[in-house]
Amino acid sequence: MAAHSNRRVTLLCRPTKHLSSGSDPKAYWLVGSPFLPPLTVASLLLRLSSDDLHKESVELRTLIPKGFEVIGALAYGADADAQAAVYAARRLRKLLYGEEEGDNRPVIGAVAAGSGELKFFVSESGKSNSLEEVDSVVEEEHSEKYVWENGCLVRCELPIKLPVYYPLKNTSDVEKAFVRAIEAVVAKLRDSQAVYMLEALNKTSMDLPAPIVIRGGHLDFRADLSNIWPLAEGGDNFDVNSLPCSYFSVISKGSSGFSVENADTIQVSVLFNSLGPSSASAVPVAEYIPAQDEARLLVVDIKLDVLCYASKKLPLRHAVSRLIIPGLADQLNALQNSMLPNLLGQHPQIKPYHFSPPHVLHPITVFYELSFGETEMKQVEVRRSLHTRLGLPFDRPLLRIANALDFSKLKNGGLGSQQKGSTLLRDVHIGIPNSGVSGGSVSLVQGSYEYFHYLQDGFNDSGWGCAYRSLQTIISWFRLQNYSSIEVPSHREIQQSLVEIGDKDPSFVGTRDWIGAIELSFVLDKLLGVTCKVINVRSGAELPEKCRELALHFETQGTPIMIGGGVLAYTLLGVDYNEASGDCAFLILDPHYTGTDDLKKIVNGGWCGWKKAVDSKGKNFFLHDKFYNLLLPQRPNMV
Amino acid sequence: MAGGGGKASFKVTLASDPKLPFKVFSVPEAAPFTAVLKFAAEEFKVPPQTSVIITNDGVGINPQQSAGNVFLKHGSELCLIPRDRVGASCMLRGVWADIKPFYLYIPALL
């Protein structure tokens, strides 16, 4: 039996969520950080290649941001073996970080038998084979605060136009020349003449600390990241080389909360000092290297973009030497490998993107090849494989370019739309008063939508356009969640669609005719490929009975619902339902509003608000003598 | 409920009647599904223009497909429901109907 360790494992993620019962044996990599206490598990990544560790290391090298690292492995299944997991983790660490197998970093081996019960073992040193079982396992409640309270992001964008000279006679030499050119760039990054300028990312319009310049000569490429000694405070001389990352921290945090998007970001620019310190004045000189034979120039366009995680206490120069420069070197090598096969032909258009997917504590970096667009089959496969590795659902786009972290825009906390020229209000239900249902559980629409109502765009649809407006709100939801990029259709375009599928005569276009839930389902199917479910109730009195089904819809699909009946159309954004007492309320977004897009007016006037089936005056919100059709759009299964 | 010999059979339930009566229809596979909608509406004595057929799970069916297609995609257990048509208050419709074309008010010119 394994000896018992005094150490403690801290779980920032919930591994049991990833483990599904009764499936094939799986292996996961455990990710932690040298800036967090040892044996702190920040995330779980599925091992995709069960035999090719080298392939795993290539994919993980640029996926996991520097500042996070693989600290162990988890084996799931009937034959799960902690020793094998530790061995695999140590071999992966060697491939990724060049550590020797006899290294003294503690590595976690975790096993989950079929029952889902997790056991953690730690191997203190690669030299011995002994494992110790860890009894103390702590599940941290506020994981995001844990990671981002004392952490920040460091980013470096470096576009390079790399000139490669190769002899015409021997075109296969171009590959060697390219590899040499890349090596030269990596060497130049470590050169003492390299200069790194660090500044804070302008997220608010507050005054920012002055930029800092660090010279290559002062960089220490062997500093140990997990041993950061707090630097001596104060002192009269402003020593650039001892400034910590917290120098760039924005002082007031407010209530924005801890997350990747709100983290302090330090932007690094790479510069090169071509003029060394020289006391002698000299005549300008041009250097040339004669080519043996006729040679050709090939320019390779490279875009590098690294994002790293650092502790706020980390000295800035260590952030550059141990995070940014290795990150840039890794990206250069990854790009080299993808460009090599096609150097003389069409270069693939590869660009790195950073993402912060939901329920993953750290950002990830992915290289996308965009020559053929995002919906190209190979790109869909790449995204599906990433979704599998990260444990993300397969029914929603989360790793599209539109989902990528955008470091350019200023932080905007308002509800206004961030599209240029759009004045539509978004997510008007946020912050409205409570529903009045006590002890109920609230299920809401997931994601963003825009509020469409009567008289917008100067279009007079008052009295007939409410179902059209509800449809526009639903289509805006699919746009904002990146399922589709089509423009939200006008009333005329909606009518045209119905004529084109044969549901209406051509004379329908341009009229003020009413439509209902069924027409909406036809248009959603035609314009967006979205299928819908329809719930039909014979009387408005039956709607409260459907609350459980509606709550389940918001939990699983999370799309806005259109309610049509008794001559009125509504958009349903959520339900508040108390299972025990049966008390319920409906979060209604009313498309019949004819006023201006003023959030206060809309909320105070009840145009977006919780409606109970029977209000305090005894009046029924839904008519009991009319039937109702509810339209429930389903998320298309696409990434 | 099989589709043999080039025919597709469907069991359609009338959702608006609490007794949930149903009828079975058989149509050629190549026939447009609108034919099933028409027969069902006639049998249940509801107007076909204001009715629509959905599956028992509530998935909407575009009637502009062949009956064979619908059978393959959705099976044969179907529901007939009334279509809602929503706009706003009925009053507004009444107002438009009352306004006659302006030229009728112009007295005839000599």
Image (spheres, coloured by chain):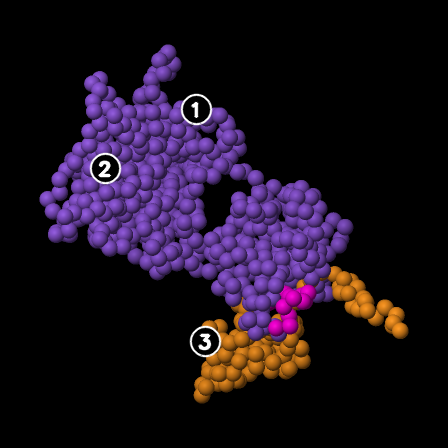
> What residue is pinned by disc 2?
A185
Q: Which is more toward the observer, A254 or A111?
A: A254
Q: Residue at x 50, y 85 (%)?
A: B28
Q: Which residue is mark 1?
A: A209
The kind of residue tagged 1 is: Pro
Where in the figure is residue B105, as x and y percent of width and height? 85, 68
Task: Name the subunit of mark 2.
Answer: A
Q: Which mark is residue B72?
A: 3
Q: Residue furthest bottom?
A: B5
Residue A540 visible in the picture: no
Task: Name the one closer to the observer, A62 or A588.
Answer: A62
Q: Residue sitting at 68 percent across and 59 percent down?
A: A461
Question: Picture coordinates of residue A440 (x, y %)?
Answer: 60, 48
Residue shown at 32% from the left, 40% from the top = A159
Q: Secondary structure at mark 2?
A: helix
Q: Sort mark 2 into few (<14), some (14-19) or many (20+) by Cα contacts within 10 Å.
A: some
Which residue is more in the foreground, B58 or A301? Answer: A301
Point 34% across, 50% down: residue: A368
Range of the magenta residues?
A506-519
Residues at discs 1 and 3 both on one chain: no
Q: Secondary structure beneath disc 3?
A: helix
